[in-house]
Amino acid sequence: MIPVLLATTLAIHPFDLVHVDDPNYPGADAVSATGAVLLHPPAPGVPWRWETVPEVDDAPPSEAMDAMNVGAWHALGARG
């Protein structure tokens, strides 16, 4: 609900995200080696850009699970 309300307030699509180049940005919703993703623009003075959520393809989930060899992990008891 909050992202939709924020998106309405900022006049953006509710599934656009904010990307900052600092992977250690405090309060980030997701991080990687290339930066952090936030649901809203950061504090003034922090460089950022919009990042669109990638579209999901129509591949069945089993194909992704096979590609990641999930079955072997499940056989070892890993389920998270």
Image (cartoon, helix red, strand yellow):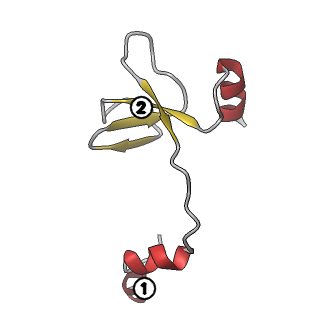
Looking at the figure, which quarter contains the N terminus? top right
Between circles 1 and 2, the one closer to the viewer is 2
Would you identify the image quadrant in which residue 59 lies? bottom right
Q: Mark 2 Cα within 10 Å, few/some/many (few <14, many 20+)?
A: many
Q: Position of residue 23 (x, y in %)?
A: 31, 36
Q: In the image, is residue 54 above or below residue 45?
A: below
Amino acid type shown at disc 2? His
Q: Is residue 16 left or right of residue 80?
A: right
Identify the residue under disc 1: 71
Amino acid type shown at disc 1? Gly
Residue extending farthest to the front is 58
Which comes before the other along the chain, label 1 or label 2? Answer: 2
Q: Position of residue 14 (x, y in %)?
A: 65, 35
Q: Residue at x 37, y 80 (%)?
A: 69
Q: Is residue 39 left or right of residue 48?
A: right
Q: Is residue 74 left or right of residue 1?
A: left
Q: Residue at x 55, y 51 (%)?
A: 55
Would you identify the image quadrant in which residue 28 lies? top left
SS for tag 2? strand
Q: In the image, is residue 70 above or below residue 25?
A: below
Q: Nearer the viewer, residue 27 or 42?
A: 42
Identify the residue under disc 2: 19
SS for tag 1? helix
Q: Residue at x 51, y 48 (%)?
A: 54
Q: Nearer the viewer, residue 46 or 8?
A: 8
Q: Mark 1 Cα within 10 Å, few/some/many (few <14, many 20+)?
A: few
Q: Position of residue 3 (x, y in %)?
A: 65, 34
Q: Position of residue 5 (x, y in %)?
A: 72, 28
**Alpha carbon distance from label 1 to label 2:** 33 Å
Residue extending farthest to the left is 33
The number of discs equals: 2
Q: Residue at x 64, y 26 (%)?
A: 12
